[in-house]
Image (cartoon, rainbow, N blue to C red):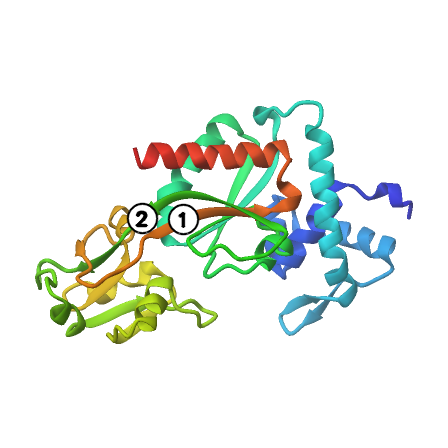
Amino acid sequence: MDPLDLDGHALHLLLAVHEEGSVTRAAQRLGLTQSAVSHALDKLRALTGDALFVRSGRGIVATAQADALVPRARALLDELRAFSHAAGFDPARWEGTITVAANDLQRDLLVPPLLARLQSQCPGVRLRVWPSQAPRPELLRDQGCDLVVTPRPPEAADLVQKRLFEDRYAVFFDPAVRRAPKTRAAYLGAQHISVRYEDGRSIDIDTWLAGRGVQRELVATVPAYAGIAALLRGSQRLATGPALLARGVLHEFASAPVPVATPAMPMYMVWHLRRQHDPAHRWLREAVEAIVGEALA
């Protein structure tokens, strides 16, 4: 097979199958038939001389060669995008998929207006949203994510971050059942619900309070703020989180200042250095900044 037959579509397909771990899901994501994806994979196998993906139970797993090729494929796609945009970037002609990692707060605040802006100005672009959890550098390096919006930016020399806004912490409660805790004693004497990510890491406010000797009775933790509502509703329990959650997943609850000292909560957008000068990525970053300004005005 002539290596010149390799194109951006083949690289995009390789990444999709690798990320989804399924030919069927990759086909759905790319808008192709399963047979078309399988046929394209056969061409890639002929070119690379490797199976790339093998069956494991009911699914497939990548070979070591495929794992090694994925970062190179991603870098080549970045170069292709930069090449195609070099003569002048036109959002209306931009085609592809943007992947943004965000948790509940930033997802509800920023993703709906971002999608509306994309559909208006970049109709050929699709938006994909992942949970960011407590993000690691690999999310932007190796996992196909274009932008992370997080209060906890991963530290790495090849990542770039920019502060978007600052929120404060609030305590949420069901006003049909209880009143706001006005004193430190009332706050510490209550039962609390909080978030612990799937990798076992706690949210920043819990780490901050525990580090200063503030001991609360955490009766349950959930992997995202969206899971808190069902455990607060109709109970005396409290939950401490960013005040802007009142606009999203905790909108049905009352909130009040936390009656113990808490820090401010900054929010950042983070991207990989290789995307710094990509005109399309610059458009994305500027769009997010504009949306933040409008949402918090």
Residue 113 percent coordinates (x, y): 39, 36
280 horizontally vs 197: left or right: right
Residue 120 percent coordinates (x, y): 47, 27
- Which label belongs to residue 167? 2
Q: Nearer the viewer, residue 40 or 195?
A: 195
Amino acid on which disc 2 is placed: Asp
135 horizontally vs 87: left or right: left
101 horizontally vs 208: left or right: right
Seen at 65% across and 52% down, the residue is: 16
Circle 1 Cα neighbour tier, 10 Å, few/some/many (<14 / 14–19 / ≥20): some
Residue matched to label 1? 267
Residue 284 percent coordinates (x, y): 53, 36
- Which label belongs to residue 143? none
Circle 2: element type: strand
Seen at 63% across and 54% down, the residue is: 141
Q: Nearer the viewer, residue 148 or 214?
A: 214
- Give the quarter of the figure containing the C terminus: top left
Seen at 17% across and 62% down, the residue is: 259
Asked if the residue under mark 2 is in contact with the one under mark 1, i.e. CB atoms within 8 Å, the reply is yes
Circle 2 Cα neighbour tier, 10 Å, few/some/many (<14 / 14–19 / ≥20): some
Circle 1: element type: strand
Label 1 or label 2, whichever comes before in sequence order? 2
191 horizontally vs 60: left or right: left
Q: Is residue 115 visible?
A: no
